Image (spheres, coloured by chain):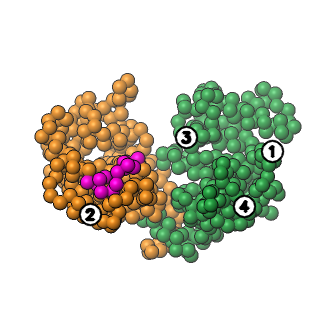
Chain colours: A green, B orange
C-alpha cells in the first residue's frame, strides 16, 4: 500500500515548466531518494508533496499522501496533514527554527499541538517529559542546557538535531529530508546520517531523502529517482541504478562521483 | 625548489577572539599543487587572507620569494600582484554584474599596467578555460555557475601569475560541472603553482599532489596526498577520511561518457 503516490506532477511558473510530469510511488516503510543537481526540480517536488510551493507556482497532476489529494487541497486540509502525515527537515535548520524562542519551548509547542490534535492529555509536566525524551532520542547532549538555549547559541549539527526532534514530535508517517546534511561539516554529517537511519528504523517511518550527493543517498535509501531539468530520467533500486545506470545522465553523475571517490583510495 | 609564498610560524587572532591560527608554517613551492583541507573554523580562509596580503599576522611572517611581504613596499606589492592571483568560491558574487566579460577578464592587465595586445591576451585566457571569443561582449548574468567560474579562472591567469590561490573554487558547483572545472584546475596546475583551499577531500585528492590538513588553527598533517590518504598518521586525518561518504562497492566503474 503506497503512502505517497505522485502522478504526472507538473509545476509551472510564469509559463516556465519547472517540474514536468513527474510520477513515482513510495510504499509505507520504504526509503526513497531523489537525486538531482540544481534546477532538477527535486526540492520543488518535495514542496509540492506537502503543499508548500512558493507563491506564484502552480501545480497540476496528482499527489496522494496517505489517501488525501494534496493538489488543490485547501490550506485547512493541508494543515491537518502536515506534521500528522509528513514532516520535513530542511538543509538549513535555522529556516525551521524561531530565532527568538528557546529551543526546548519550540519542541514543546510541537509536542503540545500533536497531543492536542490526538486528544491526548498534555499537561506541562507531560510536555516537559516528552521534550526531554525527544532530545534524548536525537542524541542531544546536556538536554537541560540545550533546551534553554536560543538557536544561534547552538552548533549547526545541534540545530539540525533540534529540527529533527521537532519533526519527530509530529509523529509523522513520512519524513522528508531535503538536503539535511549539505550545510554540515563532513564529520557532523556522518553522525547526522547515522541518526536519521536509526530513527527511521526505530520508528518505522517512511523516508523521502532529497540530495545531490550520490554516496550519501546510496548509504541511506533503498530506491532512487534521478531527476534532471524537472523530469525523472531514471528510477530503480539503488543497487541496480548505481551498478548498471541506463540513462546517459545517470552515468555521467556516477562517473563524476566515482572520480572523486576513487581519488580517496580504498574505503 | 624555491618557495614562492610561505607562512613562517604564523599566529593570528581576530580582534577579541580566540586564536584562529597557531604557529602555522606552510610553503608553496614553485610548480606544486597543494590542497589545504579543513572543516569550518579550521583557519583555512584566514591562511588565504594572509597569503593574499589582506591582513597581517600578529606573530610570524608571510614570505614572498623568501622576503617578508611588506604591504607598504609598493614595488614589492606590484611584483606580488603580478605573481599571485585568486579564484573565489561564489561565481555569482565574484564577477561584477555591470561589466562585460572583456572588461572583467582584462582587469588584472589594466591594474598591473601590462602592455601589449590586451584583447589578444584576454581571448587566449578564455580559450584556455574552454570559452570562445564571442562571449567578450556579454554580461555575467548570461552564464551558468560553471561558466562564470571559468571566466573567473580566465581573469586569474590572464596576466600569467606564478601562483593561483583558489578558495573553495568548485564547492558551489554541481557535481557534473565540478568535474569539468577540476579538470581545468588540473591543466592549470601543470603550468603554474596552485594552492587549492577546500573542505572537500575527494576534490583535493583528485587534484593536488600535496595535502595539508588543518584542524583548529593548526596543521596536523602535511605531505604527499597519496601517501597521507593511504596511511593517515594523525587521529584527526583518520577521522576526516573515515567520515567522507563513500560510494558502495557495487558501483560499476563505468568509463566516463
**Label 1, label 3: how many angstroms apart (C-alpha)?**
33 Å
**Label 2, label 3: how many angstroms apart (C-alpha)?**
46 Å
Query: At 55% across and 59% down in the image, what residue appears?
Result: A39
Residue that badge 2 annotates: B123
Magenta stretch contains residue B101: yes
Q: Is residue A265 visible?
A: no
In this image, B202 relative to A139: left or right?
Answer: left
Q: Which residues are magenta?
A: B93-106
Magenta stretch contains residue B177: no
**Label 1, label 2: how many angstroms apart (C-alpha)?**
59 Å
Residue B32 lies, with reference to residue A80, above or below; the image says below
N-term mark: 3 or 4? 4
Residue that badge 3 annotates: A157
Viewer-closest of B247 and A212: A212
Q: Chain of mark 3?
A: A
Q: Chain of mark 1?
A: A
**Label 4, label 1: how many angstroms apart (C-alpha)?**
19 Å
Amino acid at each position: 500500500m503506497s503512502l505517497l503516490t505522485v502522478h504526472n506532477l507538473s509545476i509551472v511558473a510564469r509559463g516556465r515548466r519547472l517540474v514536468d510530469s513527474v510520477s513515482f510511488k513510495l510504499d509505507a516503510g520504504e526509503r526513497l531518494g531523489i537525486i538531482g543537481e540544481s534546477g532538477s526540480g527535486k526540492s520543488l517536488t518535495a514542496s509540492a508533496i506537502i503543499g508548500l510551493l512558493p507563491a506564484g507556482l502552480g501545480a497540476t497532476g496528482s499527489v496522494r499522501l496517505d489517501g488525501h489529494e494534496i493538489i488543490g487541497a485547501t490550506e485547512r486540509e493541508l494543515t491537518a496533514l502536515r506534521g500528522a502525515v509528513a514532516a520535513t527537515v530542511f538543509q538549513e535548520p535555522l529556516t525551521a527554527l524561531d530565532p527568538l524562542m528557546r529551543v526546548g519551548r519550540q519542541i514543546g509547542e510541537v509536542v503540545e499541538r500533536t497531543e492536542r490534535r490526538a486528544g491526548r492529555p498534555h499537561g506541562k509536566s507531560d510536555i516537559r517529559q516528552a521534550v526531554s525524551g525527544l532530545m534524548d532520542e536525537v542524541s542531544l547532549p546536556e538536554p537541560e542546557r540545550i533546551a534553554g538555549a536560543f538557536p544561534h547559541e547552538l552548533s549547526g549539527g545541534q540545530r539540525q538535531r533540534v529540527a529533527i526532534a521537532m519533526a519527530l514530535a509530529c509523529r509523522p508517517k513520512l519524513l522528508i529530508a531535503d538536503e539535511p546534511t549539505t550545510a554540515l561539516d563532513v564529520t557532523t554529517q556522518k553522525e547526522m546520517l547515522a541518526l536519521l537511519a536509526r530513527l527511521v528504523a526505530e520508528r518505522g517511518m517512511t523516508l523521502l531523502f532529497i540530495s545531490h550527493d550520490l554516496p550519501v543517498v546510496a548509504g541511506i535509501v533503498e530506491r532512487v529517482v534521478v531527476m534532471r531539468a524537472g523530469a525523472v530520467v531514471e528510477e530503480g533500486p539503488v543497487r541496480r541504478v548505481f551498478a548498471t545506470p541506463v540513462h546517459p545522465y545517470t552515468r555521467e553523475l556516477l562517473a563524476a562521483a566515482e572520480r572523486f571517490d576513487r581519488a580517496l583510495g580504498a574505503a | 625548489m624555491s618557495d614562492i609564498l610561505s607562512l613562517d610560524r604564523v599566529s593570528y587572532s581576530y580582534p577579541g577572539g580566540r586564536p584562529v591560527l597557531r604557529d602555522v608554517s606552510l610553503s608553496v613551492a614553485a610548480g606544486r599543487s597543494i590542497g589545504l583541507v579543513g572543516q569550518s573554523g579550521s583557519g583555512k580562509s584566514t591562511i588565504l587572507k594572509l597569503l593574499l596580503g589582506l591582513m597581517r599576522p600578529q606573530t610570524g611572517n608571510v614570505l614572498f620569494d623568501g622576503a617578508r611581504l611588506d604591504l607598504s613596499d609598493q614595488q614589492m606589492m606590484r611584483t606580488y600582484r603580478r605573481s599571485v592571483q585568486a579564484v573565489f568560491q561564489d561565481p555569482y558574487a565574484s564577477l561584477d554584474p555591470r561589466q562585460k566579460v572583456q572588461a572583467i577578464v582584462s582587469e588584472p592587465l589594466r591594474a598591473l599596467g601590462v602592455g601589449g595586445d590586451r584583447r589578444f591576451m584576454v581571448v587566449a585566457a578564455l580559450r584556455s578555460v574552454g570559452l570562445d571569443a564571442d562571449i567578450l561582449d556579454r554580461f555575467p548574468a548570461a552564464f551558468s555557475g560553471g561558466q562564470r567560474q571559468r571566466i573567473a579562472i580566465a581573469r586569474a591567469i590572464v596576466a600569467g601569475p606564478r601562483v593561483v590561490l583558489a578558495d573553495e573554487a568548485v564547492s558551489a558547483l554541481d557535481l557534473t560541472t565540478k568535474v569539468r572545472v577540476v579538470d581545468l584546475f588540473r591543466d592549470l596546475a601543470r603550468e603554474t603553482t596552485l594552492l587549492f583551499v577546500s573542505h572537500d577531500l575527494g576534490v583535493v585528492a583528485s587534484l593536488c599532489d600535496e595535502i595539508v590538513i588543518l584542524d583548529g588553527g593548526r596543521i596536523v598533517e602535511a605531505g604527499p596526498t597519496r601517501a597521507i590518504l593511504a596511511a593517515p598518521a594523525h587521529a584527526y586525518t583518520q577521522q576526516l577520511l573515515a567520515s567522507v561518504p563513500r560510494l558502495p562497492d557495487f558501483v560499476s566503474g563505468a568509463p566516463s561518457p
